[in-house]
Image: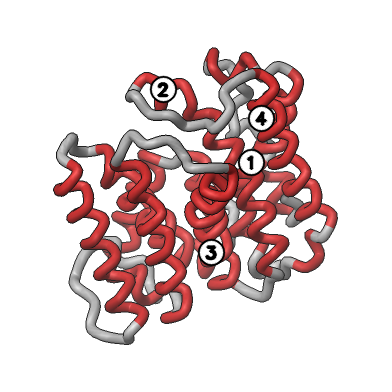
Amino acid sequence: MNFDDNLIACAALVERADPLRFRATMAAPVSARQVLFPLYAFNLEVARAPWVTQEAMIAEMRLQWWRDVCEEIAEARPVRRHEVATPLAAAISERNAKLLDDLVAARRWDIYRDAFEDAAHFDHYIDQTAGTLMWVAASSLGQADESVVRDAGYGAGVAAWLHAIPQLVDQGRVPLLDGTDAGVSALAQKASARLKKARKHRTMVSAAARPALFSIGASAKVLQAAIDEPARVGDGTLPHVDAFSLPWRALSGRW
């Protein structure tokens, strides 16, 4: 696979809209970038689909378009020509395309204003979005233990979610089951524990797959700040998730 116009377009999209993952991907080998840029561009397209319109039906149609792309890849059928869909089809396996379909389906929650039903529903949402994205990225690059990667994805996903709380509240969403200080702290503690567990077993992620986890960034610091001062979540004053030493992480392979 060469860095053609489609891959360049994917990289540009990630650079504009997801600077954390752009930085992390640029620290990876070129061969890994050819996988990660289409995957992260796909994630951006899916994540923003529910937010670009106030019409639920149109948002559903936008998500369905991407579910159709995943189905085409999963069934090894010709994939529609698109600057993201085309390189994505070359970057992932048929099995991983099925997992990405689950990711798109989970994003339907973003269309509506309903609260999460319970803790299991919230955990499923984070796992199907952040966890699945990280797992597909890692497994597309090399050998990795799925439970380790998903624990890491949950920790990073909750950190990113806590960062988004003020914006979600402003848009009339109910992003937390328990928005009290105690509830926020408990959620951050749970996510921090899973991230620490993943890092304890980091050797179960091969060197080839590690760049998929560089995007964890400063999630641990974000979660710790939410544990210590949960009011910072609502205030929007948590540490920046991209405030981390990328050169050290790339050289050491530690995430």
Q: Residue furthest right?
A: 200
- Asked whether the beta carbons under mark 4 and mark 2 sit within 8 Å of each other, the answer is no
- Front position in the image: 31 or 62: 62
Mark 4–mark 3 Cα distance, whole angstroms, equals 23 Å
Dot 2 falls on a residue whose secondary structure is helix
| Amino acid beneath label 4 | Val
Amino acid carrying label 1: it is: Gly
Cα distance in 3D space between marks 2 and 3: 30 Å
Q: Which residue is mark 1?
A: 217
Task: Tell which tag, 2 or 1, sits nearer the viewer.
Answer: 2
Residue of label 3: 137
Earlier in the chain: of badge 4 and badge 3, it is 3
The answer to whether the residue labelled 4 contacts the one labelled 1, judged by CB atoms less than 8 Å apart, is: no
Could you tell me how far apart the alpha carbons at marks 4 and 2 are, in whole angstroms? 19 Å
- Label 4 residue SS: helix
What residue lies at 36% left-to-right and 39% top-to-bottom? 16
Measured Cα–Cα span from mark 3 to mark 1: 16 Å
Instruction: Judge depth for marks 4 and 2 and give the one in front.
Output: 2
Residue under numbered circle 4: 222
